[in-house]
Amino acid sequence: MVSGGSAIRGSRVGSGPMGEQDRGVHAERIAVSYWDAAGNETVRHFAANLPEEEIPEVIDSPTTGRPAGRDKANPPQVAKNEPYKTHLAYVKERRSEDEAKQILDEALQKLRERRGTSA
């Protein structure tokens, strides 16, 4: 029995010899390590010609979701989450009690005028 094998099975047509390294010029790059509060290290690669001020100081750790910084001894801490505020809470921050009463009175007066029940 003769096997009907193919010499190019498992390779792309025109790919050249197996293990071909000629895939273009790789840009120079640098590795920057980031650590989160749990001690996890994340390495990010940046172009070697990138100015230092464009390399971020803090990233989000893909492992924990916490912020990760470049200083291993002092990783950034999770910022305190503010509780959800309702619309009324935001309004109360902007308006005093007297302003709120005045605005409410004006709105009620306009409503009464539209309905024809102005007192």
Image: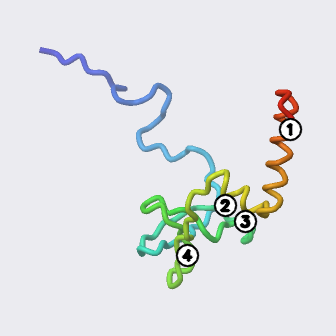
Front label number (4 vs 2) = 4
Please state, as top left, top right, bottom left or bottom right, where the C terminus lies in the image: top right
Q: Which residue is mark 3?
A: 54
| Amino acid type of the residue tagged 1 in the rendering | Ala
3D distance between C-alphas at marks 4 and 2:
24 Å
Residue at figure coordinates x 79%, y 56% from the top left: 100
* Count of marks overlaid on the render: 4
| Amino acid type of the residue tagged 4 in the rendering | Pro
Residue contact at pointers 1 and 4, CB within 8 angstroms? no
- In depth, the one of 100 and 79 nearer the eye is 100
Identify the colour scheme used. rainbow
In the image, residue 42 lies at what x, y percent?
Answer: 48, 66
3D distance between C-alphas at marks 3 and 1:
65 Å
Q: Which residue is mark 1?
A: 119
Determine crowd level at label 2: few under 14, some 14-19, many 20+ residues with C-alpha closer than 10 A: few
Residue 47 bears which disc, if any?
2
Q: Secondary structure at mark 2?
A: strand
Q: In terms of sequence position, does the residue under pointer 3 or pointer 4 come before the other?
A: 3
| Amino acid type of the residue tagged 3 in the rendering | Glu
Q: In terms of sequence position, does the residue under pointer 3 or pointer 1 come before the other?
A: 3
